[in-house]
Image: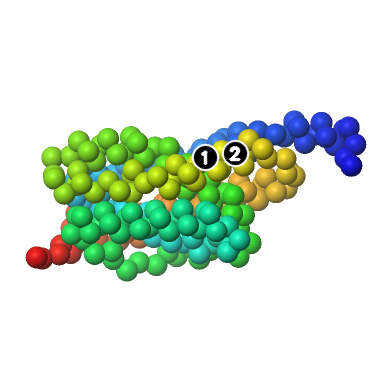
Amino acid sequence: MPDVAETEDLDSRKGNLRRRLRQDTRPMHDWVEGVYDRHDIRTREGLAVLLQAHALALSVCLQALPASRQRARQGFQDLLGAIEADLATLGIDRIPAQSSRAPSADIHPLGLIYVVAGSRLGANVLLARVQGSTAPDVRQATQYLACEAGKVLWRDVRTALEDWRGSADEETDIIMAAQKAFTWFGDACAEIERKYELHDRQYGLARHED
């Protein structure tokens, strides 16, 4: 049984992890947000970049999640399925791309889930933009941004963070994992941009023909 001092130390850290995550990952969060803000998701081309890049980053995060995290893995897979459906609505094939950031076997899963689930908090804002598009196919491609799996993931993460009573060292591992996940999302956008040759403003999107 822990002594009184140890118990008080654990209690003082309860809820601290969420604050540390928010504070220590803010620069990475702002960087990733700026990367994606270059693309107008009210257009078919801009939305395609977001969907393709998120698919790439989510795939890397999924590879890094241990098999024991079945609930989170299913959530990630549901999000990927929603992306595939939206790309089909846009008439766009998912392009082959490979992240230059291979997942580490010892990355802390809670940090990854925090980033993926937290991204859903801004999804309502992005959803409103997409729904305001003048393009009918873009307005219909909302399964990913409206995906219920993301909301479930965030509820699970919020509970885990509120109940957190782990060590300071493990907190650091979680924060490092979250920072790495942000890097994957930013790098994924850059990779998709290269595939679409956006520096020449040529997206090279392949539309299905009926």
Residue 126, horizontal then vertical, whole percent: 31, 39
Horizontal arrangement in the rendering, residue 165 relative to residue 39 (left or right)? right
- Mark number, residue 155: 1
Distance from Cα at disc 2 to Cα at disc 1: 6 Å
Q: Is residue 43 above or below residue 52?
A: above
Quarter location, residue 97: bottom left
> In this view of the protein, which residue sits in the foreground, 82 or 49?
82
Quarter location, residue 209: bottom left
Q: Image point 57% across, 35% down: which residue? A: 23
Q: Check disc 2 and report its element: helix, strand or loop.
A: helix
Observer able to see residue 28: no
Q: Image point 44% across, 42% down: which residue? A: 151
For label 2, the residue is: 159
Q: Image point 72% across, 40% down: which residue? A: 165
Marks 1 and 2: in contact by CB < 8 Å? yes
> In this view of the protein, which residue sits in the foreground, 4 or 194?
4
For disc 1, the neighbor class at 10 Å (few under 14, some 14 to 19, many from 20) is: few
Amino acid type, mark 1: Arg
Residue 82, horizontal then vertical, whole percent: 33, 54
Q: Image point 16% across, 49% down: which residue? A: 137
Residue 42, horizontal then vertical, whole percent: 21, 42
Amino acid type, mark 2: Thr
Farthest residue, direction left = 210
Horizontal arrangement in the rendering, residue 60 relative to residue 174 (left or right)? left
> In this view of the protein, which residue sits in the foreground, 102 or 81?
81
Observer able to see residue 43: yes
> In this view of the protein, which residue sits in the foreground, 162 or 43?
162
For disc 2, the neighbor class at 10 Å (few under 14, some 14 to 19, many from 20) is: few
Horizontal arrangement in the rendering, residue 25 relative to residue 78 (left or right)? right
Quadrant location of the C terminus in the rendered image: bottom left
Horizontal arrangement in the rendering, residue 168 relative to residue 84 (left or right)? right
